[in-house]
Amino acid sequence: MKKHSTNIRIFLSAIVLTGIISSPIHAQEYGLKKGRNISLSIKGQQTDNRKTYFNLGLLSNYQNLNGASINIISDVVHQRTSGFQLSGFVNIVGNRSSGMQMAGLANISGIKSHGLRIGGLFNISGKSTFGAQFSGIGNLAGNNQKGLMVTGLLNMGSVDMKGIMISGMANIAGNEQKGIAISGLTNVSGGNMHGAQITSLMNISGTTNEGLQLAALSNVSVTNKGLQLSGLANYAGDNKGLQLGLTNVSNKCGKGVQIGLLNLNGDSCARQIGIVNLKPQTRTQIIVSGGNLNKTNLAVRFKNRLIYTQLGASMILGELSDKVSVAGIYRTGLAFPLIKDRLHLNTDIGYCHIETLDNSNLPDRLYAIQPRVGLEYNPHKRFGVFIAGGYSWERTYKNNQAHSKHPIVEAGLVFF
């Protein structure tokens, strides 16, 4: 054991001594930048642009690597590497690196990097990176990133990012993104996005989305030519694709479609499918009515040229229950003009949720499907009267069983 310890001490002493002696000689002979070189090396014989084929040491500082370099602390190469770099803390290449870099903290290339890079915290390139990168905090490039990028927090390319990007927090492309970006919080493309952005919070495309934006919260794009799919909201300055979410907002909508609970568009030609659809020509109207089933009904109607949707609340008494029940109703239908701006034929179908309250002889809640046909007369632009008839089929939520059925007769007033 003592013999082995003695040999190790002699070996390390030789490394330190060689580094101390050789460092100033190399700096003087080959014009290298100042830096300690505590290592053993196998080098080529050319005096100009000398290459290191194998390097083993504590910390290294030399001109070019064509082979392998293993260091306990750091490996600094002033110009180019082609091969394998492994260090406990950091690998630094002044110009271009090709091959494989592994470091406990960071891999840094002044211009370009080609190959596989694994950094405990960062992988950084002054301009471009091509290949695969894995890091704990970030993969950063001053220009372009291409290939596979996986990091705990941030992937960023100041110009373009192409390939597969996976991060815990964000993927950011200063200009264009091509490929798939998956992040924990956000994906950002300053220019066009071709491919897919998938995140839990927000996706942003600064110019055009020509692929898929999928977010649990929201998607934003100046122009959407692809699919925006979100759990809460989608926004596009100009929607030429498909927006699918709870809320969809667009200033213009040349050929696009909005599908959601609430659709808002600044273009009268927008194609909208939803509970509430709003665009410049939409009229918001208040309806007060009553009938044999719904004794009192108050509703808001959103009416476009032919299509309308309606949200309302009702009090039910008599036909269905002896004591008061309440209901929420949603209707969607078509209004056919019989006399322009005066008389319309309205046809719609409604879904009615009924809370039976204190009616002990009824289930706690029911639902009903209610088709109707009616006539609406508008003697004034902001006032109208209507009468409608239809049928209501009530069913139980539990086991979806038929409960009762009733004809519907309603009449009421329309304001605004």
Image: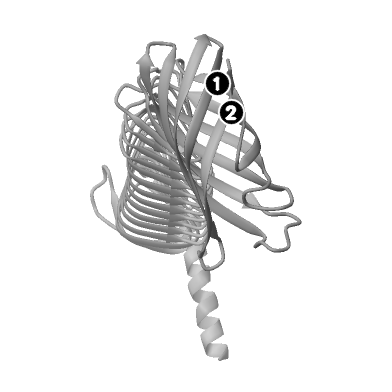
Measured as percent of width and height from the top left, residue 136 is found at 52, 56
**Judging from the image, what secondary structure is the residue with disc 2 in?**
strand
Measured as percent of width and height from the top left, residue 7 is found at 50, 81
Classify 381 as above or below 288: above
Q: Residue furthest right?
A: 358
Q: Nearer the viewer, residue 135 or 343?
A: 343
Q: Nearer the viewer, residue 412 or 416?
A: 412
Q: Residue furthest top?
A: 380
Q: Amino acid at mark 1?
A: Thr
> Which residue does the image show at 46% across and 62% down from the upper left?
71
Classify 146 as above or below 307: below
Mark 1, residue position? 284
Answer few, some or many: residues within 10 Å of disc 2's Cα (few below 14, many 20 plus, some between 14 and 19): some
Mark 2, residue position? 300
Q: Nearer the viewer, residue 111 or 176?
A: 176
> Which residue does the image show at 71% across and 53% down from the upper left?
322
Classify 348 as above or below 168: above
In-image side of 45 versus 132 (left or right): left
Earlier in the chain: of badge 1 and badge 2, it is: 1
Measured as percent of width and height from the top left, residue 195 is found at 31, 42
Q: Quadrant of the C terminus?
A: top right
Task: Examine the rendering and report whether any part of residue 22 can be seen.
Answer: no
Q: Amino acid at mark 2?
A: Val
Classify 217 as above or below 45: above
Measured as percent of width and height from the top left, residue 8 is found at 51, 78
Contact between marks 1 and 2 (CB within 8 A): the answer is yes
